[in-house]
Image (cartoon, rainbow, N blue to C red):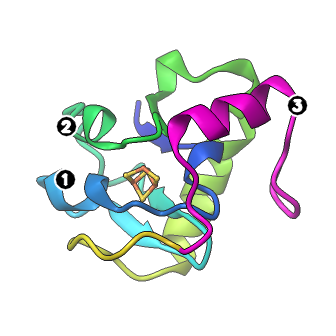
C-alpha cells in the first residue's frame, strides 16, 4: 500500500505535506508533487497536512482518482525529492474553489 497525491494538488502545490513526511517520500514536479510508493511508510502524516485534501491512502482512493496511483509512481521516478515547504503556486485555489470545480466535473488539462 502507499499514499497517493491526487487532482487537488495540480496547479496548487501547497507543499505542507512534504515537511511532515518522515521518510522524504515526496518528489516535486512542475504542477504537483508525487509520493514514491517504494518509500512511503503509510504513516498518514501528510493527509491532514494538505489544506486541499489532495492526499489519500491507496485503499481510500476515490474511483475518479485511480489514475493518480500510476501517475505518482511515474512522477516520483522522474522528479527530484522535495522535503521543505515552499510557496504555493500562484494558481493555487482553496478547498471550496476546488470542490466547486469538482462538482462541475473539472479535470486539469493534461492530467487524467
Ligand atoms: Fe499538494 Fe497538498 Fe502537498 S496541495 S504539495 S498534496 S500539501
Marks 3,2: beta carbons within 8 A: no
Determine whether, in the image, residue 45 is placed left or right of residue 109: left
Q: Is mark 3 within 8 Å of ligand 1?
A: no
Q: Is residue 87 magenta?
A: no
Residue at the spot 30% in from the left edge and 76% down from the top edge = 86
> Which residue in the protein does label 2 denote?
45
Could you give the CA–CA distance between mark 1 and mark 2, rounded to whole angstroms?
A: 7 Å
Residue 20 drawn above or below residue 83: above
Residue at the spot 69% in from the left edge and 33% down from the top edge = 65
Marks 1,2: beta carbons within 8 A: yes
Position of residue 37 measured from the top left corner of the image (x, y, whole percent)? 42, 49
Q: Earlier in the sequence, mark 3 or mark 1?
A: 1
Q: Which residues are magenta?
A: 90-112
Give the mark toward the camera: 3 or 2.
Answer: 3
- What SS does tag 2 mark? loop
> Which residue in the protein does label 3 denote?
105
Which label number is shown at residue 21?
1
Amino acid at each position: 500500500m502507499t499514499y497517493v497525491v491526487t487532482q487537488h494538488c495540480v496547479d496548487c502545490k501547497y507543499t505542507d505535506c512534504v515537511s511532515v513526511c518522515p521518510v522524504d517520500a515526496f518528489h516535486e514536479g512542475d504542477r504537483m508533487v508525487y509520493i514514491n510508493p517504494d518509500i512511503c511508510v503509510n504513516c498518514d502524516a501528510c493527509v491532514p497536512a494538505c489544506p486541499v485534501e489532495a492526499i489519500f491512502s491507496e485503499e481510500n482512493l476515490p474511483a475518479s482518482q485511480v489514475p493518480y496511483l500510476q501517475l505518482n509512481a511515474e512522477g516520483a521516478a522522474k522528479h527530484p525529492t522535495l522535503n521543505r515547504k515552499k510557496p504555493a503556486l500562484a494558481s493555487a485555489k482553496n478547498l471550496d474553489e476546488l470542490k466547486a470545480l469538482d462538482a462541475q466535473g473539472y479535470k486539469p488539462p493534461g492530467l487524467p
